[in-house]
Amino acid sequence: MKISSRADYATKAMLELSINPDHPVTLSYLSRLQNISISYLEQIFAQLRKHELVKSVRGPGGGYVLNRAMADITVGDVVKAIDNISALSQGEPSDKTHSLWNQLSTLVYQHLDTISLADIHHAAENVRGVHQAA
């Protein structure tokens, strides 16, 4: 199982939006931050919007904000939205390892569904606290 680069960029963008959840973030800012094209981000954000993870804010000072609280958005939500994962049954059913990889992928996605954006923020704060105390 491999997380796509699109899902990686999307997760990083979602974390950036969650830093200041009430302040819209522009795609041009994210493009500079992640060193990727705006058109690539537009494709990613189209999927995030479609799955109702983000919403756009129009006008001056506009951009994107989270559509739900960061505690209610998991890494699994982001990865599944970007990689269009609904069923894991890929490959030949007669393949002896097919069932094993399907089960393993299911476990990984279930675990990603337990990690919210808020969890990542709390973990980062704990790491910062340890570094500042040292």
Image (tube, rainbow, N blue to C red):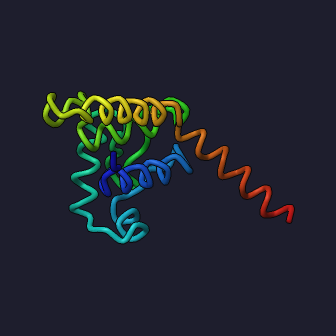
Q: Residue at x 21, y 52 (%)?
A: 43
Q: Residue at x 39, y 62 (%)?
A: 30
Please provide percent x and percent y for residue 18.
52, 46
Please provide percent x and percent y for residue 80.
32, 37
9 to 69, vertically: above or below: below
Please provide percent x and percent y for residue 22.
52, 44
Nearer to me, 30 or 97: 97
Q: Which image quarter holds the N terminus?
A: top left
Please provide percent x and percent y for residue 128.
73, 58
Q: Which image quarter holds the C terminus?
A: bottom right
Q: Residue at x 35, y 45 (%)?
A: 57
Lateral position of residue 129 relative to residue 112, left or right: right
* Badge count: 0
86 to 37, vertically: above or below: above
42 to 82, vertically: above or below: below
Nearer to me, 23 or 5: 5
Lateral position of residue 38 relative to residue 20, left or right: left
Nearer to me, 120 or 62: 120
